[in-house]
Amino acid sequence: MTTATRFGEYLLLQRTALGGMSEVFRAQRQVRRPGEPELALKRLLPMLCEDERVARLFLREVEALRRIDHPVVLPLVDAGEHGGVPFVVMPWVHGANLRQILRSGDSDAPQQPLPVEAALWLGSQLAAGLAEAHAVGVVHRDVSPSNILVDMLGSVYLIDFGIARVVGLAQTTHGQGLRGKWAYAAPEQIAGQTIDFRTDLFTFASVLIEALVGQAPFADVDRESTLARIGRAEPLRWPQLVEPLDEVDELLRAMLARDPDHRPGATGLVAQILQRALVQVGDPQGLRAKQQLAARTRGVKHESAAAKLLPAELRGEDVTNPQLDPDATQVRMDQEPPDQGGA
């Protein structure tokens, strides 16, 4: 059994993720508060702490989490600096990310789509959380399967606001790129154009389609072909949605419009349409959907999934060391976007 490491007032029990910029630990306070559950502590890699630009980028997540108050977004428990290393603490989620769920935790297994009800429930929850984020001026910019968690009860969480755009905070230096998951980029990200809440809608639609069909909609034979398809907004695959889900099909096509002006003008509208779809499939409260998600989550092979830190799971984490993530693409953030869309 691995010995816990002391870090300030916390004990780091197990490192569960490693990226080019930060690492995440399952943790607990050295002196636990009554009833306090285990925590997730994310800290900047020590060798990067002297880079002020990277440190500012890391702390952007703190401000994002302080602004957002929604059950889908894990609350900020603590944030600070210890020994010159910035860190952020959130509740630990006992579950799995969407990538693991689609693969049942087996990195070599083909992905299996979610039941329609489960996909609609997951989508409605994420859309509601994104609507709240957009309403307070936060654009996630990295909506992807590895940043979506599901716990053992089927509850859904959107995590990792590490490269979020937060209105009122200085952006990265002009001309500098932020790493993003290339298979889930939007056309304007690839082109280095203005990024706003509608960028999240495009990437969110890609994730929802993947949940429905089991494969990323733009994933082609290689990176270049995939990026070309994203640039043209020309997906390779599409879910077979017929009545009573015609409105969802129309919604997804609008969210994947190449021109952001042709996408929905408010994230809350997306949440409303997906909620209506749950009513149409006979699961208005998402009870059946949550049971389905919970069962898939419990079926994940957690030990084998935790034993491998797969490059695909780290895409988008690397903002400083491109050699660690050859599949990432540059996501530029040089222009001011228009007002954000909310509920």
Image: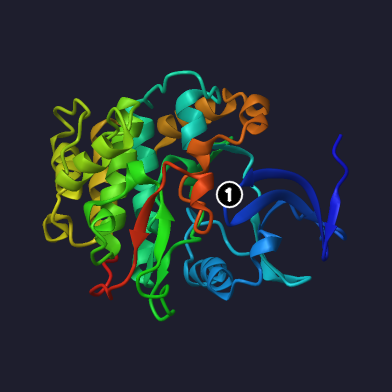
Q: Tell me if I can see residue 65 in this picture.
A: yes
Q: Tally the marks.
A: 1
Q: Position of residue 49 (x, y in %)?
A: 66, 68
* Among the 4 quarters of the image, the one containing residue 341: bottom left
- The secondary element bearing badge 1 is classed as loop
Residue at position x 35%, y 45% in the image: 182
Mark 1 = which residue?
Answer: 19
Q: Relative to residue 217, is residue 200 depicted above or below?
A: below
Residue depicted at 55% across the width and 34% down the height: 310
> Is residue 156 visible to us here?
no
**Residue furthest to the front:** 323
Q: Quadrant of the N terminus?
A: top right
Find residue 39 and report its horizontal and vertical position in percent: 70, 53
Q: Residue at x 23, y 64 (%)?
A: 193
Within the image, what quadrant is residue 167 found in? bottom left
Q: Nearer the viewer, residue 177 or 58?
A: 177
The quarter of the image holding the C terminus is: bottom left
88 vs 238: above or below: below
Residue 271 screen position, x and y as percent:
29, 51
Local crowd size for mark 1, using a 10 Å CA cut-off: few (<14), some (14–19), many (≥20): many
Q: Amino acid at mark 1?
A: Gly
Q: Is residue 8 left or right of residue 212?
A: right
Q: Residue at x 68, y 62 (%)?
A: 47
At which x and y percent is residue 25?
70, 49
Image quarter of residue 195: bottom left
